[in-house]
Every structure is written in structure tokens, then in C-alpha cells.
Image: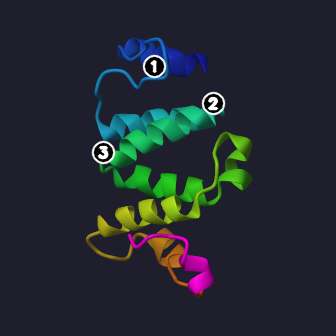
Amino acid sequence: MALMALTLHASGMAEAGNELGPPITPAQQYALALEAQTLGDYAAMAQWLRASARGGHAPAQRMLGMALIGAPALYGSALAADLCEGRLWLLRAARQDAGGTADTAYALFGRPRGDAYTAPCEAP
């Protein structure tokens, strides 16, 4: 946590409250998410992943999708599982894959297994 605080302070992003601070690039937000994950601060990891994913960063979209799908097993109670949102982020990451082969996460998760499995999710 100290390293993350130092990183945030050095980048000028340390401020009171739960705000993300001044704008930074999605790649920088993703790097902060990875740092938070390393430090075990999964709430901060999710916050930075969401910011980066919203900015269109495919690796963040992929990681957020996988985190939301496997949340309890991967991150305990720090992150709630959401299969529908996870599927959405994996699809967004897969759509950025020009070759169509690199995004196996969505290819594996996105296969319908019957109406009971996919019905609760809205169409992406």
C-alpha cells in the first residue's frame, strides 16, 4: 500500500476521498490496477480496472471481465461476481482483437450453454 501511495503522490493523484484524481491514460490506470492487485488492494484494483476499461484499454477490459467472472474465488469478498458485466467486458476486449484469435477468454466464456445461462444478460 505504501508503494501505491507513493506512486499516487508522485503522479499528483493523491487526494482525499475516493476520487481517481486528475486524468491519466488508460494504460497508466491499468498499471495502477496491477500495482493494487500486487498489494492485495482489490477494491482499488477494481476501481482502476473500471476506469481503464471505460477508456478502451483492451487488457483492462479483459482483466476486468475475468475478475468479475471469478471474483469470489480470485478476490474474496472485495469484488462481487457479475457474470453479465464480465461477459460484456470480455466481448469489448475481443472486439478490439483485429486478428480474431488472441482473445480466447471471451471465446471460451461467450459460448452459450442454453437459455438458462445467457437469458439473464442483456444482449451486448
Total numbered circles = 3
The quarter of the image holding the N terminus is top right
Q: Which residue is mark 1?
A: 7
Question: Eyeballing the image, is 113 above or below 12?
Answer: below
Q: Most prominent secondary structure in the magenta stretch? A: loop
> Can the viewer see residue 81?
yes
Question: Eyeballing the image, is 105 above or below 28?
Answer: below
Q: N-terminal of the two: label 3 or label 1?
A: 1
The quarter of the image holding the C terminus is bottom left
Kind of element beneath mark 1: helix
Per the rendering, the mark at residue 39 is 2
Segment colored magenta: 115-124
116 magenta-colored? yes
For the residues marked 2 and 3, what is the alpha-carbon distance in whole angstroms? 23 Å
Kind of element beneath mark 3: loop
Looking at the image, which residue is at 46% across and 32% down? 32
Pointer 2 local density, CA inside 10 Å: few below 14, some 14–19, many at least 20: some
**Which numbered disc, 2 or 3, marks the residue closer to the eye?**
3
Horizontal relation, residue 69 to residue 89: left or right: right
110 magenta-colored? no
From the top left corner, tell me how far across and down residue 55 is, in percent. Answer: 30, 45
Q: Amino acid at mark 3?
A: Gly
From the top left corner, tell me how far across and down residue 78 is, in percent. Answer: 67, 40
Q: Which residue is mark 3?
A: 55
